Each structure stands twice: as structure tokens, then as C-alpha cells.
Image (tube, rainbow, N blue to C red):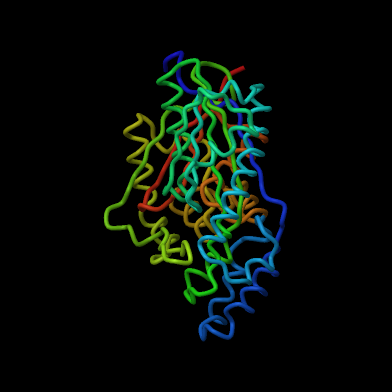
Amino acid sequence: MTRDAAHLVSVATAAPQYIITQPEVAERTRRMFGLRMPEFDRLAPVFDNAGVETRHAVRPGDWYEEPHNWTDRTAVYLEAATELFVTAARIALDRAGLAASEIDTVVTVSSTGIAAPSLEARAAASLGLGPHVTRVPIFGLGCAGGVTGLSIAARLAEARPGTNILLIAVELCTLAVRLDKLTKANVVALALFGDGAAAAVIRAGGGGLARLDGGAEHTWPDTLDIMGWSIDQQGFGVIFDRSIPTFALERLAPAVDGMLKRQGRNRTQIERFICHPGGQKVIEAIEDALLLAPKALDHERAVLAEFGNMSAPTALFVLERAIAVGLPTTSMVMALGPGFTLSTALLTRASG
């Protein structure tokens, strides 16, 4: 490994102020959909089985029971996503011992709103980014965005040794609450998703928390219908057209093994898989597929219970917890996202 390999210097997370409990979400969803969906009672147990106890949201609960068009949602996205961007970035910069003016490149990952100028431009003044900063906004990666963002940031760092890369993943999933979508996918989304942001500083050279030993992706053919957005006049609508837990159980292990083989590794060398917790059943499917011990993905369950599925930032929330208790020598961060794609990043704990 070269001296200028990318290293993870810091990780930080942030969540908005409003906390909504799962029983409250279930009650509100019943008010919104119960009388209009004949199958609602059959779907209602998803709120008890999702593994979510609370989640954070950018607006109080009553806001989501009111109709909102794309203009309304976009206004909230621009305001709240920018605030979360700045909050998460400041914590990550403080942990890295850097000023915002020392950042050379910002990689912004977000798929729950559209902003042009993009979020890092909107946050630049309040955060204190310098006018020289290179901006790399990325849209469309969904739940895989945080992990793919790590890999992209690492490659950018290695391409320009000595520069500081700031990665931000911010998602406001609750803005996709749709009163007009009387679908199973919409109810499942209401049981799972919350809002949050995560940030990381990456730099080529030694030190830091861990060396980033390379990222990889695997996209399965003919899987565009598994996860994504539909878009109409009201905004984004969630797509879940196949069972993600079943797909993961059947397809995950061969993909992971193939990715590791291309990187000169094998599964037995990975001491901890740090996973995006898409939902309780997804966590269980990953454990079964990778032959992990039952309940091995404890950080994943804890993040899901406290924050729900926040899409792209969620894997970085899990990574932050893994760092807090001590990374093993070798770990792999991984997430599944639209495409349908598995994204991974290898970490080797920094010595000293």
C-alpha cells in the first residue's frame, strides 16, 4: 500500500430536532390511510416489525398529515438539508482538527431533493468554505450513497495527495410522505424512513482512523424495479417492487465474495461487516447470507431503532458507532441501493 493511500480522518452525524415515535407514526398513518386502503389492517404490523422505535424529522408530525406539492417539499429540503449539512460538517471538521477553509473538495451525496446551486454551495458561506473549493454533488445513489461517497472521496484524495476531502451525505426521506399514494410501498416507507446527515473527512497519507483500501460496486442486471423514486407533480414517490430481504438472502454473498476476490481478499479476512440497516428483515437477511452470528449486526439494529432508515447517511451512523467502540483490524462498510447495487468500502484500522 502506498504512502499516499486515502485515510478516514473523522466521521460525524447529525439529526433534525423533531423526534417521532413509531407508535405515533403508526397512529398518524392509520388516520391518513386507514379508511382509504382496504388492505391497511393487513399491512399495519409492519410498524411493529420494522425495528424502528423513533426517528428524526425536519418538520413536526402534523406537517406530514397536510397535503404538500413539490414546491412545498423543495422549499423545506433547501432550508433543512442545508442546515443539517452545516451541522454535520462542523462536527466532522472539529474532530479532524481542520477549519472549513482548509477543505479542498466537497463531495455532497443526496437523493431526496433537488438543489441547483447544490447544497455545498448554499452552505459555503455559513460553513466557511474557501472560494477555491472543488464541488462534487452526487444524486441518485439512494441508500448506497454514503458508502459510494466514501469510495469516491478516497479516490479524489489519492489523486491529489495533501488535499482534504469533505464528504457529506444528507437525506430528508420524510419529505416523500405522500397522502395520494395508497400503496404498500408507501406504508412500508412510512414505517422505516427518517431524516439525517453524516460527514467524513478523508485525506491521503498516514494517520487518521483507518486506511480506505478501496471501494467496489456490484449492480445486478434487470433490477431497476427493486428500489428508487417515481416522480410526478407532487414530488418523489417511493418504489419497492420486490422483496429486498429475499433478494439479499439469495444474491448478497456471491456478490460480496466476487468483490473481495477482485480486491485480493476473502470473506474470512473481514472481521466486521458495517452495514446499512435497511430494515429489521434486511439486517436478518444480511446476517444469514454472510453466515454471521445471530444478532452480530448490533450497531445496525441500534441505529435503526433510534433513527430509522435515513438512506445514504445511515451506514455512516453505524460506522461512527463502530469507531466509538474500536474498529477491528479489517472491516467492510456496505450498503444496498437503487440500481440495484451493492456498494462496499474496505477499511484497515490505522496503527498507533
The image quadrant that residue 85 belongs to is: top right
Q: Position of residue 244 (x, y in %)?
A: 43, 60
Q: Position of residue 290 (x, y in %)?
A: 45, 48
Q: Is residue 183 left or right of residue 254?
A: right
Q: Is residue 254 left or right of residue 233?
A: left
* 331 up-or-down from 221: above or below: above
Residue at image location 62% in from the left, 32% down from the top = 125
Residue at image location 61% in from the left, 53% down from the top = 195
The image quadrant that residue 76 belongs to is: bottom right
* 295 up-or-down from 317: above or below: below
* Quadrant of the drawing holding the N terminus: top left
* Quadrant of the drawing holding the C terminus: top right
Between 350 and 207, the one lying in front of the other is 207
* 181 up-or-down from 101: above or below: below
* 150 up-or-down from 54: above or below: above
Q: Position of residue 272 (x, y in %)?
A: 53, 38
Residue at image location 52% in from the left, 46% down from the top = 275
Residue at image location 67% in from the left, 54% down from the top = 306
Q: Residue furthest left?
A: 221
Between 296 and 90, the one lying in front of the other is 90
